[in-house]
Image (cartoon, grey):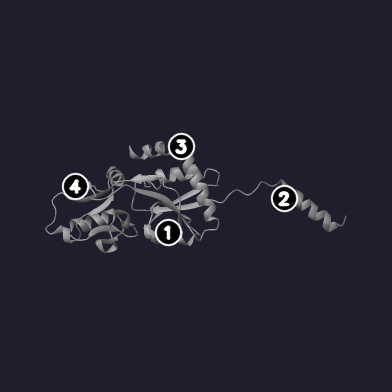
Amino acid sequence: MGRTSRWCGGLLMVMAMLPLPARAAVVACGGDNQWPPSSYRQPGSDAVQGYSPDVLRAALADRVGVEVRLMPFARCLAAAEQGRQVQLVMAASYSPERAQRFLFTRSYLQLQPVQLTLQTPLPAATRLPWCGLNGFNYRAFGLSPAQVDAGSANYPDLLRKLQAGHCRGFVEYREVWQGLQKLGVAAGAAPLAMRPLPGGSPVRVHFMISRQMAGAERLREQLDRALLRLEAGGQLQAMLARHLH
């Protein structure tokens, strides 16, 4: 056997003894404007908490890790669509426009739409648009883009715009708003009245995976199987309860 053959054989033996490469980590994003129970930070903490990170880590426990980043939601969508630095969006509602750019997993959370207005309504408030957050999908509430002034970056900005009389109120999910109140987001704001959104039905949310990501279909299949398993075992309900109460 020649020197080259012996060297190649030795290299193959060393490679065979090395551990198999771990599966790649997944980077997920959500909005940084606080959106409990899905994802949020406690005051004074940089740690991301929430139902969505818990579910994602449980579903992808066989991977090296799941990294969760919170950022302006419009930037989250743009980064995830490219599929390089970020591959997945948490707690996304379905729209045909999004489905052209992303794959949707099965639903893992259901939320109830509500409307929030000042307890003392402004004169002619019904002629005003709804206040909204940049990048948010208001079609899930049955609202068209023309009905929403979606120029607010976060809830403090939105509440200031509402109190200044620039909009009639805003729509959100009951579970989200109750969580935001616990986090103190509405502290100091004018009293608000919360009512069911007329004609609103529960909205299902999903994980969205970039169609540009290599292996996107395989990742969706893996998540769907895991979500079914976690739901059947009662683990989804238990994880959600930790962030609702």
Residue nearest the viewer, comparing 52 with 72:
52
Disc 3 element: helix
Which mark is in front, 4 or 1? 1
Disc 2 element: helix
Report which residue position mark 1 lands on: 99
The kind of residue on which mark 4 rests is Ala
The 10 Å Cα crowd at callout 3, few under 14, some 14 to 19, many 20 or more, is: few
- Quadrant (top left, top right, bottom left, bottom right) of the C terminus: top left
Q: Tell me: residue 197, above or below residue 228.
A: below
The 10 Å Cα crowd at callout 2, few under 14, some 14 to 19, many 20 or more, is: few
Q: CA distance from mark 1 to mark 3?
A: 27 Å
The kind of residue on which mark 3 rests is Ala
- Of callouts 2 and 1, the N-terminal one: 2
Residue 142 x %, y %: 29, 56
Is 146 positioned to the left or the right of 99 in the image? left
Outermost residue toward the right? 1
Residue 12 x %, y %: 76, 52
Q: CA distance from mark 3 to mark 4?
A: 37 Å
Report which residue position mark 2 lands on: 15
The reply to whether the C-beta atoms of the residues labelled 3 and 4 are less than 8 Å apart is: no
